[in-house]
Amino acid sequence: MRQPRIDYSDALDQALSELEGTIRERDRLNAEIVKLTNTVRMLSGMVKEDRERTRKLHALLGWASVAGPGLVDGVRVALKKAGDHGLTAIETRDALRNSGFDLSEFVNPLASVHTTLKRLAGQGEAAYGQERDGKPVYVWTDSYGGSWLSNLTSVIEDQRRDARIAAAEAKLSRKKN
């Protein structure tokens, strides 16, 4: 008996569509995790903690920070939320802080945000909009410019770069202390 022929093109389109939906859901969940993490931190200072609650609090906050979005993902989400209005580097940094994104691991968060915005613009994920107060404005393009492989490579490189920057800045911070 002959095997049915598989249409790889349709299978790829379906997989890409599912991946896109899953990434969008992940972004929504990451934003919710940040909100809940902030709520837990705020409430934990107002409640007398017992040993079990303290253990659970530290474990979950640790998981939330490890599993949370990196700087590049945070900037992407901020730009997406800003829509056509776009954001300057300062507005992006402030949007990250307001959303609860932890910038404390960066020695100079504004410089890190600015570098990330320039990189996203260079990759075609963001574009320069009209200047505001003499500062460049970045607008999310929702573009997948380039091949899927170069985009995947960029995502992996972004995550590795974020980890290297955070490690270097943490080392520098420890030396200063």
Image: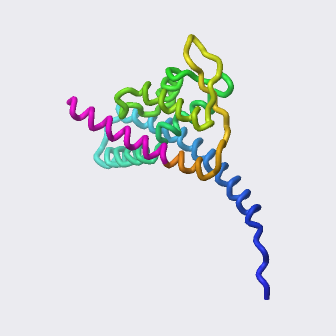
Where is 10 relative to 151, above or below? Answer: below
* Quarter of the figure that contains the C terminus: top left
Tell me where the magenta segment starts and ends, as one range. 157-177
Q: Residue 17 colored magenta?
A: no
Q: Main secondary structure of the magenta part?
A: helix
Residue 10, located in which quarter of the rendered image? Answer: bottom right
Residue 46 makes an appearance in the image: no
Which residue is painted at 35% across and 32% down in the image?
45
* Quarter of the figure that contains the N terminus: bottom right
Looking at the picture, how far across and down is residue 79, in whole percent? Answer: 60, 30
Instruction: State the count of labels.
Output: 0
Relative to 20, is 134 on the left or the right? left
Q: Residue 174 colored magenta?
A: yes
Which residue is painted at 23% across and 35% down in the image?
174
Residue 129, located in which quarter of the rendered image? Answer: top right
Which residue is painted at 37% across and 32% down in the image?
106
Relative to 66, is 176 on the left or the right? left
Q: How is the image coloured?
A: rainbow
Looking at the picture, how far across and down is residue 9, in whole percent? Answer: 75, 62
Relative to 47, is 100 on the left or the right? right
Residue 163 makes an appearance in the image: yes
Which residue is painted at 51% across and 38% down in the image?
72
Looking at the picture, how far across and down is residue 160, in whole percent? Answer: 43, 46
Where is 31 relative to 3, above or below? Answer: above
Looking at the picture, how far across and down is residue 64, in whole percent? Answer: 43, 45
